[in-house]
Image (spheres, grey):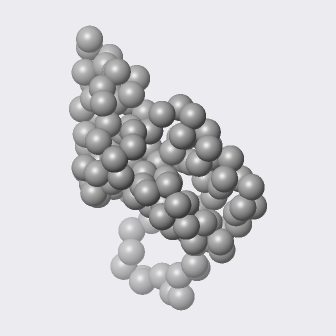
Amino acid sequence: MATEWTPELKEEVIAAYEKAEPTPETSAQIVADLAEEFEKTPNGIRRILSVAGVYISAAKKAAASTPKDKKAAGDKPARVSKEDSIAALVSTLESLSLEVDDSIVSKLTGKAAVYFNSLFEQVKSNG
C-alpha cells in the first residue's frame, strides 16, 4: 500500500470497476478483488468509486418485522452509509487541500466520519 492515489490510479480503478459490470450482488466482491489487485484497502477503493459516483452498494435486505415501540421514521435523521460518510469527509478534506491518509480514514466509523466532516465543513465556511 505504498503507492499514493494519483489521478491516473483513480481513473484506472474506476475503469476496472466499470469493466467488471458490477451489480448490487457482485459489487462487494469486485471491490475486494480490486483492493487486492491494486494493493489498496477495500474502503479506499470504495471511497474512490463513491466519490466518482460509480459505486453500486449491496442490495438492502428487508427487515423481517418492525418492533411496535420503534419510533416513526420522521423522528430520526436519515441514515447515511459508512462509505458515503467517509467519501463526504474525504471530499471535504481534499477541497481544503489536506492530505488524506486512507489507512486512518478507512478505520473511522460512519458516525465519526459525519462528525469530523461537519467540523471541517465549519472550518471551510468560516475560513
What is the count of numbered marks? 0
* Residue 108 visible from this viewpoint: yes
Query: Residue 83 location in percent, x, y?
Result: 44, 54
The x, y position of residue 65, in whole percent, is 51, 86
- Residue 42 place in picture, x, y as percent: 45, 60
Q: Is residue 111 visible?
A: no
70 or 63, nearer to the observer:
63
For residue 68, above or below residue 52: below
User: Which of 38 and 88 lies nearest the eye of the viewer?
Assistant: 38
The residue drawn where x is 39% and y is 75% is 70
Is residue 93 shown above or below 17? above
Q: Position of 120 compared to 8: left or right?
A: left
Residue visible at 43% across and 33% down in the picture: 91
Query: Which residue reaches farthest front?
Result: 2
Toward which corner of the image does residue 68 lie, by quadrant?
bottom left
User: What residue is shown at x 71% (from left), y 66% (from top)?
Assistant: 23
User: Which residue, as the protein is rendered here, is positioned at the far top?
Assistant: 127
User: In the picture, residue 127 is in which quadrant?
Assistant: top left
Residue 7: % across, % down: 53, 32
**Residue at the bottom extreme?**
64
Above or below 75: residue 7: above
Q: Relative to 102, does residue 81 appear above or below in the rendering?
A: below
